[in-house]
Image (cartoon, rainbow, N blue to C red):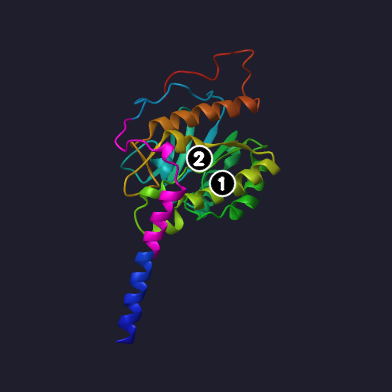
Amino acid sequence: MKNIMISKFKEHFLILLSLLFVASGVIISNDSYAINANAKSKNSEYIDNRIDEDIKVLFIGDSRTVDMFSADKNEIRGKVYNNITVYAKDGGTYSYMRSTLNRINVKNYDVVVSWMGANDHGNFEKYSSYYKKLKKKTKGHLVLCTIGYSDNNKLGDLGDCLYYNDGIMQRYNKGLTKWAKKNKVETINLYSFTKKHITARSNNGVHYVPSPTVDLWNYTVKQIIKKVDRFGLVDNDENPEKVVLESK
């Protein structure tokens, strides 16, 4: 009887905790960013802009990256979009990033762009030492993207409320931006872009719609091109058309 009572107490406690997280989302979320969940992508096609073919760019991410290209796949292994080689996996964490980059040898790439961290529960610290090594391997041509927002009003279950709420995302980004500024590493603010322009999925709040999220990739490509230009890897004076080429 005692065990049954304890079990029921735990069950009721978890339900109450879940409700509190969802309720708090109503307070901390910004209604000005609310968008129709059924809204269609402004641009249904991927942009034509491509990285110069002589420059090797690697992009690594988790499920949000997978979603930029497919509504059905759970992993992308070395597929090329806009002359950017993409590796991404649902549920990808620090361990996935490290094992993947060690396997494919980042020294074969001129620029590495990372959109990792959404599955690491706000903990940027584990990335910091690895990113230092990665910066050296890429001769400073490292770009870190802040992780996208979560819509607390749409979080699905207790796990989402505990580990994927927007406060968790902001905590990770705070660590990332502070480290990047200190170590002079380029960043792309995908948190601000997603919160202002991208809709979170109903009964999930973590992933985005419509899927694939074409607008998100198009914006990211434009930002990567700017970073490549800033690194001085393309001589635009000799060939002003070198960066923007034909469609992927």
Tell me the SS state at disc 2: helix
Residue range in magenta is: 17-40
What x and y, as percent, mark residue 159? 40, 59
Q: What's the residue at 42%, 21% (across, down)? A: 247
Residue farthest to the front, as pictured:
27
Q: Nearer the viewer, residue 189 or 23?
A: 23
Q: Nearer the viewer, residue 45 or 233?
A: 45
Q: In the drawing, does residue 146 fall left or right of residue 215?
A: right
Q: Nearer the viewer, residue 224 or 136?
A: 224
Q: Residue 173 carries which label?
A: 1
Give me the C-alpha separation between circle 2 and circle 1. Answer: 8 Å
Q: In the drawing, does residue 211 fall left or right of residue 192?
A: left
Res. 203 visible in picture: yes
Pointer 2 residue = 191
Q: Alpha-carbon neighbours of circle 1 within 10 Å: few (<14), some, or many (≥20)?
A: many
What x and y, as percent, mark residue 30? 45, 42
Count the numbered circles shown: 2
Q: Does 12 appear above or below 208? A: below
Q: Nearer the viewer, residue 210 or 149?
A: 149
Proximity of marks 2 and 1: CB atoms separated by less than 8 Å: yes
Of label 2 and label 1, which has the lower sequence position?
1
Q: What's the residue at 49%, 24% (across, down)? A: 50
